[in-house]
Amino acid sequence: MHNPSPLTPYPATVTKIVDETGDVKTFTVEFDDPQVMENFGNKPGQVAQLSVFGEGEATISITSAPTRGKFLEFSVRRVGRLTNVLHQFEVGQKIGVRGPYGNWFPYEMMKGKDLFFIGGGIALAPIRSLIDFALSDQYRKDYGKVEILYGARSYNDLCFKHDLFERWPNCPNTKVYTTLDRPEEGWDGHVGFVPNYVEEVNPSPENKVAIICGPPIMIKFTLAVMEKLKFADEQIITTLEMKMKCGIGKCGRCNIGSKYVCVDGPVFNLAQLKQLPPEF
Amino acid sequence: MDVIQQLREQAKKLLEEKKVEMVIGFGEGTELARTTPVFITNPEEVSALTWGPLCANNLVKYLIDYQNLPGNVAVVVKGCDSRSVNRLLTDNQIDREKVVVLGVPCSGQLDWKIVAAAVDPAAKLKGFSDDGESFTVNTDAGDYKFDKKEAMLHKCLVCENPNPVVSDITVGKEQPVKNYEDRFAEVKALEQLGTEEKSAFWDKQFSRCLRCYACRNVCTVCTCRTCVFDQMQPMWVSKRNNLSENTAFHLIRAFHVAGRCVDCGECDRVCPVDIPLRKLNQKILKDLGDLFDAPTPGSEAGLASPLGEFATGDPEEFM
Amino acid sequence: MDSRVVNKGQLPELLDKLARDHTLIAPVREEENVTLFKKVSGASEVQLDYITSDVSPKGCIFPQTEKTISYTYTGDTLEMKEQDEPPKTVLFGVRPCDINSILALDPVFEGKFLDTYYLEKRKNTVIIGLSCSTILSTCFCTAFNSGPCDGKGADLMFTELGDKYYVEVNTEKGSSLVEAYSQYFSKGDTDKLAKAKEEQAKKLEGQFRRKVDLEGVKQVLDENFELPYWDKVFKKCLGCGICTYVCPTCHCFDIFDYVTGEFTGDRFRCWDSCMFPDFTLMAGGHNPRPSRKERVRNRFMHKLKYHLDRYNLDGCVGCGRCISKCPVNIDITQIIKDLKEVGQNA
């Protein structure tokens, strides 16, 4: 189905809400017209514009893989006006969705390789779509070992606990490393910051792609570790966040140099990032 | 020695003696009829400073931007601009110790567009002379005479303070006060209109507002860290450009500067679609004068806002 | 290319007819010193002798405020209504620089995601250009492959020559309009007028004061993102939106909802300015262009590099509005000159 106006969202319904942390909720959204989902064609790493009527729109990454089912999941941190209202949503409430926008993780290029995911805080959300894609029955055979290294400030700040502790560790040839910034009562897992943990785990760059997403400070220190571990710039992939309004490369605000994050991104490898001016 | 030469020497001295870190003044613009703000930090570069009847900008605005420099800042001001210095001091927006006021008595500022329209665009400026009732612009393509009454900015026709009311170093000779018309003539004419006519007048003006916020950004008394018009939570005035939102914007703006507006006329000058914003401010100034006997804000040091203090003798007509 | 002649005396009647059959948008003298493009009901409202409009006519195709949808939303029900099709419009009296700007805007709104709001208005609008007869000191359209009589992009291009308008018929749309109002468009001595137009164009081109040479400027910007020069330029910028709002090629917009009732509201898009701090400010508080320095740089980079990178078209058309309107005399032609110098000294 072709939508005549690119800025008009499709009506959808919130069908499930999961409290991830104190300020992050994951919303499962289903289109009111099932045909829309058939043609939506979202790929891992893409984003969508969520409409909260009366408040406007926000760009949110699609955290579910297309392989998961006929729904979309969005993990949203409560940071501003719109997300505040969204956090008060109840199951059954209507929402608008348009998209998918942006490029996607180069999953074709990653075929036959090991995947090493590194995430911090809420930023597991954008890469979760690729984790689930690679771990799906349909595509699992295309990829080698899947490792996920994820950290947050505290146990309560860990998103997707069900995935981290139950679903992913039970997938074949998959390993999950979880760390908390500080020791905590009842936590017997790893303690320390993500970059240090990466160095400890010491992944070999051999036939491997690293997918990194997290707060800027985590990315900065992790990149230094990756360099030490001899990962080439092309082996390191991340996704960027900029303020967006249209999502379709017209409204002009998400540019980094000549590139619009909404159409040329949000996924960039480190070699591409180094070509961009440092304005993000 | 002419004013420009004196200004440059004073600026050079201030910079050389490290009394200031920066001198903000007027420099040659990219068109003969224009000047542009210059920010001089090197004593060798004071030749960039100029002065004349095409220096309309109120440079005091930049004191807010550059107040956090480690050193002091000198700023070139005209009489009208100097009221802004007083006003910013009263509002505790700038530190008197960190500012050196380079006052220049002023005999009027020309509307640059009138000059630009008359002068050969290829001509090079040689200088100006003030002939009392007119300015002559001397260029290599000849001299152009501009009648003050015709070519000056309106605020200059009713100037109260040709000489800076606050100044550390005054350059140039004192100028007499000369009014070409009743200061509030335009406002009084508007007051004569009926409610519907007034409303029609302002509707027409506000409907073409672009909401570029130049009037706010240029205003020396607009010093809020987060302006109400930029605030998102709650959004008092939306970005929709229509008469209702535009009117809300202009009325809030005018009332927010009421009692503090120093009548420098910058909002009026910068408006890209010629909305006569100064008329709004002047109406309030006139009322403040009528009701509270309030002088123009900033015209004396330490002058409190008539709307910011209570006196038992104040009329309370609304009660 | 076909051409026609319109007698000056008959233009008012033609405009009246156009206004009767279409939405006619033309330059109007709003105040003594303000000319704006507005909807008119007839020739008497049109200001034929205007030089340049204070705000570009881009708003006729890309309005400053535009409703995209109306919605009724109760929580568990949602209905949306889209915009109606725009009316058949004639945009009369557009100067070559402003026509050129529409050509620069087209690829922004075309592409993979077709911006129907813009494109439908564009499709429904016949652009009638009007050659310049006065060159302002701020004009520099000749730097961008245009000129005071250049009809490129216009459906019909009118040039005033004595008591006649020489009319170039450049497109199908223009041709159908000529056919529909054929009584006003005579065949006449178009060869002679074509020659006269050429001479007039040449004469006017000699009157440009600003000689703007873009050679090498993009290369300087390609090679340098950080330049000490930007530390100098931004100092005087007041951070207002004049340059972006009067600019005929600026296309940035914002989208937001406006609540009209308990369950109803409208979604709007409206011009936004890269000069405003909240343009790039994210909900979490991070701002990738936190100061005027980054914002000023971004604006000029957009005009002189980014637009070229994306669309292979200049992001400036030399209309001179930002120069004459900037309260502090930030002048793009000076910046071009300075950047060239920076390149030569590098």
Image (cartoon, rainbow, N blue to C red):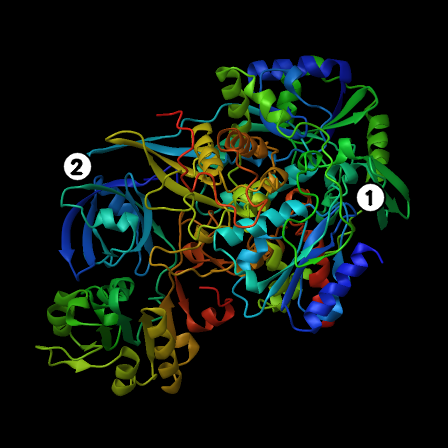
Location of residue A90 (image quadrant): top left
Q: Chain of mark 2?
A: C
Q: Position of residue C98 (x, y in %)?
A: 65, 38
As helix, strand or loop, the secondary structure at mark 2 comes to loop
Amino acid type, residue under disc 2 in the picture: Asp
For the residues labelled 1 and 2, say whether their Cβ atoms are less than 8 Å apart: no
* Residue plotted at (73% across, 69% down): B13
Camera-nearest label, 1 or 2: 1
Res C341 visible: no
As helix, strand or loop, the secondary structure at mark 1 comes to loop
Q: Chain of mark 1?
A: B
* Residue plotted at (31% across, 85% down): A204
Residue toward you, C139 or B214: B214
Residue B121 numbered tag: 1
Q: Where the C terminus of chain B falls, by quadrant? A: top left
Res B65 visible: yes
* Residue plotted at (47% across, 47% down): A250
Q: Position of residue A279 (x, y in %)?
A: 48, 64
Q: Mark 1 Cα within 10 Å, few/some/many (few <14, many 20+)?
A: some
Q: Is residue B97 left or right of residue A59?
A: right
Amino acid type, residue under disc 1 in the picture: Pro
Mark 2 — residue?
C76
Evaluate whether label 1 is on the same chain as label 2. Answer: no
Q: Residue furthest front?
A: B313
Residue C205 numbered tag: none
* Residue plotted at (37% across, 60% down): A241
Residue A231 position (above or below residue C7):
below
Q: Is residue B187 left or right of residue A279?
A: right
